[in-house]
Amino acid sequence: MNAHISSAERVAEIQAGIAEAKLDGWLFYDFRHSDPLAYRILKLDEKMLASRRWFYTSGVGRAG
């Protein structure tokens, strides 16, 4: 993984990995920094104030 890629490029890498693994998607969820891996994987600022719950799904949208 390249440390200098943008968040959008990182999401594209994740989506490609999901498609390669033949998975439907990946759910990221956080509330008050309870999931530090989500911040690292999605390249979000780990020091930002996160007082609200958020989730992000990443998938390829393939029809089953």
Image: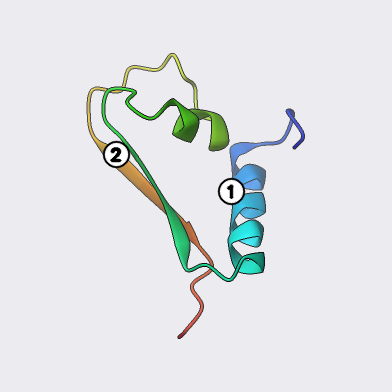
Q: How is the image coloured?
A: rainbow
Q: Which mark is residue 11?
A: 1
Residue drawn where x is 52% and y is 67% of the image? 23
Point out residue 18 in the picture as x, y percentages from the top left corner. 58, 61
Point out residue 42 in the picture as x, y percentages from the top left corner. 53, 37
User: Left of 41 or right of it: where is 1?
Assistant: right
Residue drawn where x is 66% and y is 60% of the image? 16
Q: Which residue is mark 2?
A: 54
Q: Is residue 31 above or below residue 59?
A: above
The secondary element bearing badge 1 is classed as helix
Point out residue 46 in the picture as x, y percentages from the top left corner. 46, 19
User: Left of 11 or right of it: where is 31?
Assistant: left
Which residue extends farthest top? 47
Q: Is residue 56 above or below residue 39?
A: below
The amino acid on which the numbered mark 1 sits, given as a three-letter code, is: Val
Point out residue 64 in the picture as x, y percentages from the top left corner. 45, 86
